[in-house]
Amino acid sequence: MVCPGFIDIHGHVDLDEYCGELSLRQGITTTVGGNCGASPLDIDAFFTLQEKNGFIINQAEFIGHSIHLRNSVGAIDPLKPATPEQLSRMEYLVEKGFEDGACGLSLGLGYAPGSSNEEVLRLSRIAARYGRIVAVDTRMLTGTDMYSLVEAISIARQTGARIQISHLVYQYGTGVVDEALAVINRARSDGMDIRFDSGMYTPWATHIGAALFNEDYMETNGWDLKDILVVTGQYNGKRLNQEIYRELRDSAPHTAVVVFTGIEEEIYLALNHPFAMPSTDTGAYAPGEGHPQIAGSFPRYFKKMVTERYQLNLMEAVRKATLLPAETLGLDCKGRLREGMDADVVVFDIHTIADKADFGLPDAPPVGIDYVFVNGRLAIDRGNLVDTHAGKAVRCIKPMYDYQI
């Protein structure tokens, strides 16, 4: 099969070489970073560095609100709203990010649960005015909380912005995906443009220092320490106990952990939706560390959805991984095989494509992907990495949709 290069609409590659290589080996030719409210503050400097040095794949970037942007203006307490002065400074930085080519605004409300409605709406109005999408990692209060999804959709209702719900199954794959899809469908029937991405796993990864792992929050969600696996650092491969939990929260808050939760069938239910897109939620890890999503997501998507479960035909599966994210982000030259388009191309065998990564072996490369071209240059040749500088910076300059409210 020959198709456009896959577009990973939710990742955290952010110029990490090894992370970029693992994405390329999956057939991903364009990654979108800055998700979950965490991004470089200087978008122009980020793109300029890639334009100067090249990179293994193409990169677009969101400007993230909830971590580095808030911290940069002094809103360092994730449980408290920004002051009016801090919010004004954030507005300036978000607007500058869009002028420099950020493809949208990302909100990681679970990482800054104290963010006020005012700061969320004022920044989202800027995104709407620039014709950029707002990606929302929702403010989950419990594993079955629908208010957080309604809140995300209310951003579209109040600002006119288009909304992309981040990693839907990681948020709502605990028995409420049906309800979440019903909420999304109702919003779309009311004229709001709501889309979402989802990975191919139910266990999800983040850092142990996040507000999500406060004891009260964990109790509310019913998470046991034994259900949380450390995937980086000295305790890599160990389940949490009270001693390790305390040590990491106090001394190594950036340690990555995986929470084992969710219902696998809800992955397939979510990705059947016409406006669902596969994603990796990948991030920068050392070899041998991390979540298998970093190496297996897209091959697993095609294997599960097309050849094993027959839930998508091949053309629809390709559309969701190529054209749909390109249209969502306004990338007019990607996601299509046509004269004049960027020559990002994947050649794969639908009968053999499969993921090999697993917990304990998270970066095992997939099989069945024969060739990957990035901007017309051969980057993967029968599993061999042959070009590590073909990727380009993807600056979004023109509006991707008309602002109306």
Image (tube, grey):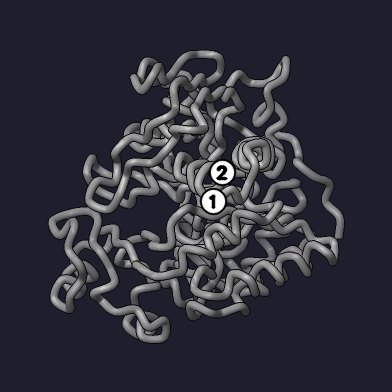
> Residue visible at 33% across and 41% down?
356
Q: Quadrant of the N terminus?
A: top right
User: At which x and y percent is residue 342?
Assistant: 63, 21
> Residue visible at 47% across and 19% down?
390
Per the image, the residue denoted by label 1 is: 309
SS at circle 2? helix
- Residue 306 - label: 2
Q: On screen, 65 above or below 47?
A: below
What kind of residue is marked 1?
Answer: Arg
Q: On screen, 314 above or below 84?
A: above
What kind of residue is marked 2?
Answer: Val
Disc 2 residue crowd, few under 14, some 14–19, many 20+, Cα 10 Å = some
Depth order, front residue of 213/365: 365
Contact check, label 1 and label 2, Cβ < 8 Å: yes
> Residue visible at 50% across and 47% down?
308
SS at circle 1? loop
| Residue 158 visible somewhere in the drawing | no
Q: Quadrant of the C terminus?
A: bottom right
User: At which x and y percent is residue 285?
Assistant: 29, 45
Q: In this view, does 378 lie to the left or right of 245?
A: right
